[in-house]
Image (spheres, grey):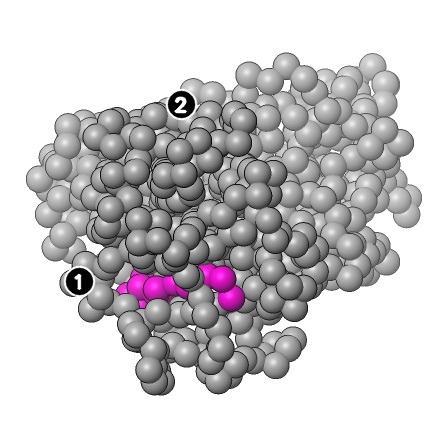
Amino acid sequence: MKRPQIESIMDDRLLVQELNRRLETGEGVNKAAEWNIPAEELRRTLVEAPAPSVFDTMPLSEAIVVEFGRPSLLVKNSTFSLPESDVWKNRLYPTKSKLEHAIQAVGRLELLDHDTYPWAGTAWMITEDIAVTNRHVALIFAQKRGKGFAFIRNALGKTVRAQVDFREEYKQQQSLERGIKNIIFIEELSDTHPDLAFVRLDKSIGLPDPIVLSTAPLKSTLQPDHYVGVIGYPARDSRNDATAMLNVFGDIYDVKRFAPGRITSIPDGASVFTHDCSTLGGNSGSAVIDINTGEAIGLHFGGQPRLANYAVKAETLLQALRHLKIQVPGMGVGGRANGKIHGNGKPAAADEPKHAEAGAEAEAPRPQDYANKQGYSASFLGATKKNEVPLPVLSAEQLANTAKLTAPGDTRPDYLLNYTHFSLAMNAKRRMAYYTASNIDGNQQRRIPRSRDVWYMDPRIAKTAQVGEEVYRNNDLDRGHLTRRLDPVWGSEAEAKEANGDTFHFTNACPQHKDFNQKTWNDLEDYVLDNAGAHNLKIMVFTGPVFQDADPPYRGIKLPQEFWKVVVMVRASDMKLSATAYMLSQKNLISDLREFVFGQFKTYQLPIRQLETLTGLNFGKLHTYDPLDRQEAFPIRLVSAGNDMLF
């Protein structure tokens, strides 16, 4: 293997870092041996060789970039398998549901009664009942006849039929076959015309929702982080190196795959662009998807081993559809014409609320608007000293990193942000809260329905100390409430409405994947709040993220991998305090919390002392009221008995 092929991975800094880490292990040495290159030479190349510019260097699509850094992921049950690379895990996870939606719209183009081919390539839904594929794929089963197009006949004179199977997944027995009724258009066979064709499918028994074509023009100036993915059906391809195919595809072919990569060139004035996703012959007609939006930016049609893969631009597809007077779906991630579809494939209402930053749809708050907010009360559970629950104590390092109020006045401490029935302290370095602290009065709860969400920056601290809307756009990340929206919503109607609105501050949000925010963690929050209401309880709740140096980077911040919650109440049985800590984890053991992506979320109860070690916070005397004090963490059962919650 030649040195220039090694250097072809140098334009992807994160992959270079990961490969260097793996060279420190036996895994990396073994991988270097597979490539027939000494590990020390590979390490020296990675460390010493100057990285080529992404703007003028095209990665070798089947060199090391492909064999290690450009995987081809098997699809099963409409989702893709877990990438080996941590870098790709963190790139793909925030928009996983949008990618899954696109995956469902891609199928294998199969032929019946053809003399040679059982299947011809890939096709994908581009409108309600129209699929797009390549010209050279369509010409395998169709031809121009008069002013239109028709199916060819086989050697026995029988008309060849075609269908699209939207399954044909790895170890998946079920099929989803839909017949092609007619050929709408096959582009002229010329090197000056794009390699595309449109076919109409039988929609009488239902078709997958189409993939929305991106209307954003591809700029000739490459963006280093413009990652894409190809969805299609790679087949065994003798034109490619056998060892490279084995490394990338594992000797599994003819089934649906998702192959992430990057755009490598966008020639000015051309109808095509190049990419370095791992593809083989059966990928002809594949969808090229922007992994941030889930929209199609191109139609893959071919490639040159160790050089580049090629795709027709989405704008060229749109021009062809307009020329044919075919209506395409409106802007959005997936969906039928005239309707926006969420990343989960469900239609949104026409008046779907938009999340807005401060000032976008309502008047931005002023510092003086917070003057009378009392915030968290340490004596909420009773006036006696024994029932007082102070705020968590920050370490010296944490205090130094707090976001200070720009005009604190008499406020002490000068980092505490008070809202209605809750308070929080911000980590200015990570731009998220160290903790939030809220009082819940189950006897005075009010169920205020959620309406049009408007999120605000808090004007009392610098905007640079807060994570804003830019992190949440075009992905599966929710603005996860730390103090839950309904927790402080109690008291008079005016008081409850004010508390409800206060929870919609970016200071009270952390980026949480929708599966995290809307499922398991939500179950725990429901359990706490519902029991508070059912038993007329007063409860203190502290919540926050666990900040780790190894948290995965995303859009200029690091995404917390775990979140914690401490619930404090007075037991009805003996009128003494009870304090319990919870952690949301993906692992089976609380001591091995690492991956943020694609794990099975698990909620654990853990000792408060252990939580203090993980967070650096000091919860004072609360550990003395913890039933788990000095015990190991374990999974929880959310149950209740009598008037006491089993914390």
Q: Nearer the viewer, residue 256 or 427?
A: 427
Q: Are marks 2 and 1 in contact (CB under 8 Å)?
A: no
Quadrant in which the C terminus is drawn:
top left
x, y percent for residue 562:
36, 43
Circle 2: residue type: Gly
Q: Which residue is mark 2?
A: 250
Q: Nearer the viewer, residue 462 or 194?
A: 462
Give the residue displayed 34% in from the left and 65% down from the top: 426
Vertical relation: 222 (above or below) 479 = below
Circle 1: residue type: Glu
Give the residue displayed 31% in from the left and 64% down from the top: 427
Give the residue displayed 42% in from the left and 43% down from the top: 569
| Magenta segment | 420-432
Vertical relation: 605 (above or below) 477 = above
Image-based side of 639 in relation to 299, left or right: left
Q: Disc 2 versus disc 1: distance between alpha carbons?
A: 49 Å
Image-based side of 563 in relation to 150, left or right: left
Q: Is residue 61 visible?
A: no
Quadrant in which the N terminus is drawn:
top left
Q: Which residue is mark 1?
A: 397
Residue 315 lies in the magenta-colored region: no
Give the residue displayed 45% in from the left and 70% down from the top: 374
The answer to which quarter of the image holds residue 103 is: top right
